[in-house]
């Protein structure tokens, strides 16, 4: 990390403990103009207080130092302490939107390590959408969070206006407009799925309470930590002041994997596969729907004549893809999971192409398919690009699809009974039909 060394035009005042980071409010500057205000000397930052710098730049005017009351700003360090007022001469920022606040749990983990840079680059929310990042970790991961912030700092993303780090969800989730809940405990050796549901359920119950207390009333929540469907249910049940429709369990990676397998079998590229639905749970009971999916606009079963392959090999490949990857590579699919989180967000903030849809685990209340009420179930969705969605009504069912949907529905109902004590529905009773845990949860 670098320390700013002032030119005569700027002044600095000391700050204290670097536990919170704030970005500059500046757009991308040319190195010449930026150097007028300060120049960097690359040397290690001690744990001592860093410099507090604020410069105001007006057209045809040399930089002028602005002194601010330390009480008016939170603690910060590095480049995130620098605040610039560039007036209106910076054409690039005139059309920029108001910054949106994104909270990320498990921010020091591998999935976040890939995802945060996609968010900061503008790839997800757009090239004119500034963002602030609020990163949640634990005491154990706090120094790693500082390292993440340093990497974000060194990446020079002009759209990234603020980075804050912390271990208290009530502080980190303050005013969050998006909450990406990635952090969860992995399944240890000999651990039953019921135990994992309880351990992670307690984490997501607490995070739901924190979101309910301090986040934006319209915060959009994407739960990635597994078992994600039931964790999303726990989270939304503990956040009664936030619309249940705002909670999602991530099944987009499963959708992406299904599209990949259909494209490979049909000998086409991925973008020719549309209308792909993952029904149900993010587990090995999930149902990749080839009945309603299309390739080049045609029903999959008209393009791929090997229906036995669709019913057996295709379905199993999608369900077990993560396990095969771990066996091959020795690690879980962090990068592709991050891509799927980005895809899931983009599907909500970008209008769905006419006639197409996407998969997301959402609350079943009022669903048109006859699926049990009160669980989080992956279903086909469409969006107008405003962050909300509606369920697709024009889908077909056959006996094969209904039978498998019933199985994954039964599993989610059993998981719900297993966490009844965390969702305000009495005493928990675990009668999980079988162990269908995905390898990535272990």
Image (tube, helix red, strand yellow):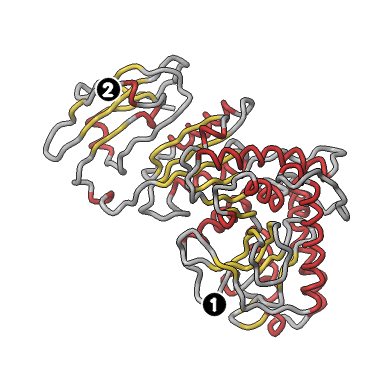
Residue 55 shown left or right of residue 143 in the figure: left
- Given residues 351 and 367, the one toward you in this image is 367
Mark 1 in CB contact with mark 2 (< 8 angstroms): no
Q: Is residue 426 above or below residue 397?
A: above
**Residue occupying image coordinates x 72% and y 67%:** 371
In which quadrant is the N terminus drawn? top left
Q: Quadrant of the C terminus?
A: top right
- The tag on residue 355 is 1
Spot the residue most to the top: 48
- Helix, strand or loop at label 1? It is loop
Work out how far the residue at label 1 is from the one at label 2, CA to CA, in angstroms. Answer: 57 Å
**Quarter residue 104 falls in:** top right
* 339 in relation to 30, above or below: below
- Return the residue nearer the eye: 99 or 72: 72
CA neighbours of label 1 inside 10 A, class few (<14), some (14 to 19), many (20+): few
Taking the spot 23% from the left edge, 40% from the top edge, the residue there is 86
Image height of 318 relative to 90, above or below: below
Name the image quarter holding residue 271.
bottom right
Q: Where, by quadrant of the figure, is residue 155 drawn? A: top left
User: Which numbered marker is on residue 233?
Assistant: none
Q: Earlier in the sequence, mark 1 or mark 2?
A: 2
Which residue is pictured at 26% across the width and 32% down the height?
35
Q: Estimate how packed mark 2 is, as few (under 14), some (14 to 19) or many (20 or more) residues with alpha carbons within 10 Å.
A: some
Identify residue for label 2: 6
What x and y, as percent, mark residue 120? 45, 45
Residue that lies at the very extreme toward the bottom in this rendered image: 302
Depth order, front residue of 394/92: 394
- In this rendering, the answer to whether 67 lies above or below 324 is above
Q: Secondary structure at mark 2?
A: strand
> x, y (%) of residue 102?
48, 44
Residue 279 x, y percent position in the rendering = 71, 65
Q: Percent position (x, y) of residue 202? A: 71, 38
């Amino acid at each position: 990390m670098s320390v700013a060394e002032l030119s005569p035009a700027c002044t600095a005042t000391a700050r204290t403990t670097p536990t919170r980071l704030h970005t500059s409010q500046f757009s991308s500057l040319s190195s010449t103009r930026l150097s007028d205000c300060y120049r960097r000397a690359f040397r290690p930052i001690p744990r001592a207080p860093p410099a507090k710098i604020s410069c105001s730049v007006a057209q045809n005017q040399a930089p002028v130092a602005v002194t601010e009351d330390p009480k008016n700003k939170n603690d910060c360090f590095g480049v995130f302490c620098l605040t610039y007022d560039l007036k209106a001469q910076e054409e690039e920022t005139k059309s920029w939107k108001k910054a949106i606040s994104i909270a990320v749990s498990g921010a020091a983990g591998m999935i976040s390590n890939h995802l945060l840079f996609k968010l900061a680059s503008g790839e997800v929310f757009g090239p004119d959408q500034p963002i602030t990042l609020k990163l949640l970790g634990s005491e154990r991961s706090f120094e790693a969070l500082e390292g993440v912030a340093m990497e974000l700092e060194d990446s020079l993303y002009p759209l990234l206006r603020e980075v804050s780090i912390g271990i208290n969800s009530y502080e980190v989730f303050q005013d969050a407009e998006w909450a990406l809940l990635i952090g969860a405990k992995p399944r240890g050796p000999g651990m039953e799925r019921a135990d994992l549901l309880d351990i992670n359920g307690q984490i997501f119950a607490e995070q739901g309470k924190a979101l309910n207390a301090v986040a934006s009333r319209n915060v959009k929540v994407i739960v990635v930590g597994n078992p994600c469907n039931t964790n999303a249910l726990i989270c939304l049940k503990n956040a009664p002041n936030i619309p249940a429709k705002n909670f999602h369990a991530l099944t987009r990676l499963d959708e992406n994997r299904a599209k990949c397998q259909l494209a490979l079998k049909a000998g086409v590229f991925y973008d020719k596969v549309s209308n792909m639905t993952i029904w149900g749970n993010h587990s090995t009971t999930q149902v990749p729907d080839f009945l309603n999916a299309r390739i080049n606009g045609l029903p999959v079963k008209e393009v791929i004549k090997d229906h036995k392959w669709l019913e057996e090999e295709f379905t199993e490949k999608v369900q077990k893809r993560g396990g095969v990857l771990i066996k091959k590579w020795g690690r879980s699919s962090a990068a592709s999971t991050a891509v799927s989180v980005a895809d899931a967000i983009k599907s909500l903030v970008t209008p769905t192409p006419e006639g197409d849809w996407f998969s997301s685990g959402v609350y079943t209340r009022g669903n048109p398919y006859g699926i049990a009420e009160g669980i989080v179930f992956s279903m086909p969705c469409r969006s107008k690009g405003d962050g909300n969605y509606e369920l697709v009504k024009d889908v077909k069912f056959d006996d094969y699809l209904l039978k498998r949907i019933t199985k994954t529905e039964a599993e989610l109902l059993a998981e719900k009974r297993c966490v009844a004590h965390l969702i305000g529905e009495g005493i928990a009773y675990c009668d999980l039909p079988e162990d269908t845990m995905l390898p990535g949860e272990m």
